[in-house]
Image: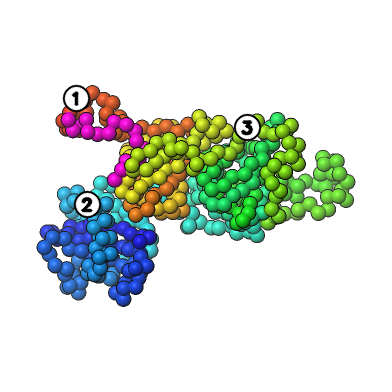
Amino acid sequence: MADTWSRQFNYGDVKLLMISVVSEELAEDPCWHGNCFLFVMEGDTQMSDPKESTIGTEGLSRRTFLGVGSAGLATVALASLAADAQEKSDTQAADHDHSASNPGPENQPLLVENPNTNLPPPTDHGNMEPVWYSFDLTHKRVQEGGWTNQVTQRELAASKEIAGVRMRLTAGSFRELHWHTANEWAYVLNGSARLSVLNPDGTVFLGDVEKGDLWYFPAGFPHSIQGLGPDGTEFLLVFDQGNFSEDNTFLLSDWVAHTPPSVLSKNLGLPQSALKKLPDRNLYIFPAGLPASLAEDKAAVGGQRVESPYQYTFKMEAMAPTKQTKGGEARVVDSHNFLAAKHIAAALVNIKPGGMRELHWHPNASEWQYYISGNGRMTVFTSEGVRTMDFNANDVGFVPRVAGHYVENTGTTDLVFLEMFAADEYADFSLNNWIRHLPLEMVTAHLNLDADTIRKIPPENFAVIPG
Ligand code: MN
Ligand code: MN
């Protein structure tokens, strides 16, 4: 049951439930046509004949109607209803009459991916900028040895502080020796890699990373990344400049190709005849043989005498959770526990099905998210409006600085995502924590809740709240 979402509508006294399910089990049903929609009448009402249906909302007449045909479907319906039900009183009139109908064309796969953008929850309002983009909508630069794509301020205009890049390197392949204007933070999504970075004092860091590890390279520090065996690596890069482009970095090959041979000869102390095979174009990503062991490589560059006193890698996924509840866990890495990460802070969040990253906000930076797995829905609250969008693996989420937000797990598997901040430390305010650290009378005056009720609100900043 990989992809499931639902939405409830109220038509007078009749409740309708709209569900999209993609499942191998259901695919065998002869009535099933891929992304179908199921309508369940609640209460005593019988399933109506779809041909007699006059419902106009969202162009339903063009879609497939199914009865409750199997236990599997019924289970899906109940599970989705519990997670997603909107009470009639919550629903504004226009959401359940003909006003929301759409006789025109629509991009159905996109609607299935992001139903809350198409028809927002009635509590959304205003005209906020999009808080969603996906790496799967971007151009992929493919070269021998791997590929890269990016979501920068060009793709997600609101994100002025952070840009993200995804990269794949096959075994042995290099992201060429380079440096750039932004600080670089990275999280390994798959496989393993060999890193090199030079310090201004001439010491050098060589290190290996694997899935769940991260690295941090300060702006201007020259570095390389090489895919290791058996199948190279894939990683997410994050830069603390919204308009950063991975296509505009300082490449070793580029400098060499644009320097006169006589100057290179003088600088390198080599005759021009020795420089005939230098690359005459950008390498950027290119294949190469697998390196020696890390110990052999360290010895080859001079051993302990030149070893970096600074650690540029960190085992994020393997660390103990910073916060843990029945609803999930969060791991926070910033300059307090990873000294090198002076300008980028991050949290790795895991939300169990039904759980929620609680209502909170961050005082010191906007939040750039990368969704690793599962299905989620985030609502962002600003002084200009409230917006809800849906998130799946490989999507990017954005929260403006100090904007309130919460993230729900809307799927049946763990929702795993990264939160990144262009800041030296991670900081957040929890709504619950705030409410419970005020005099009861003050809360009663604002929220009309009596003292006993207020005392039932969790007092801690739990990060993740169980379903
Ligand atoms: Mn770099
Ligand atoms: Mn947040």
Q: Position of residue 242 (x, y in %)?
A: 51, 43
Question: Which residue, given by chain and number where applicable, does mark 1 sit on?
Answer: 441
Q: Is residue 121 left or right of residue 45?
A: right
Asked if the beta carbon under badge 1 is closer than 8 A to the nearest atom of ligand 2, the reply is: no
Q: Name which residue lies at 54% across and 33% down.
A: 338
Amino acid marked by disc 3: Tyr
In space, the residues marked 1 and 3 are separated at their CA atoms by 51 Å
Q: Position of residue 108 (x, y in %)?
A: 35, 64
Question: Which residue, given by chain and number where applicable, does mark 2 sit on?
Answer: 86
The total of numbered circles placed on residues is: 3
Question: Which residue, given by chain and number where applicable, does mark 3 sit on?
Answer: 310
Is 190 contained in the magenta span?
Answer: no
Amino acid marked by disc 1: Glu
Amino acid marked by disc 2: Gln
Q: Are marks 2 and 3 in contact (CB under 8 Å)?
A: no
In space, the residues marked 2 and 3 are separated at their CA atoms by 53 Å
Q: Nearer the viewer, residue 361 or 68?
A: 68
Q: Nearer the viewer, residue 129 or 168?
A: 168
State how the image is colored: rainbow
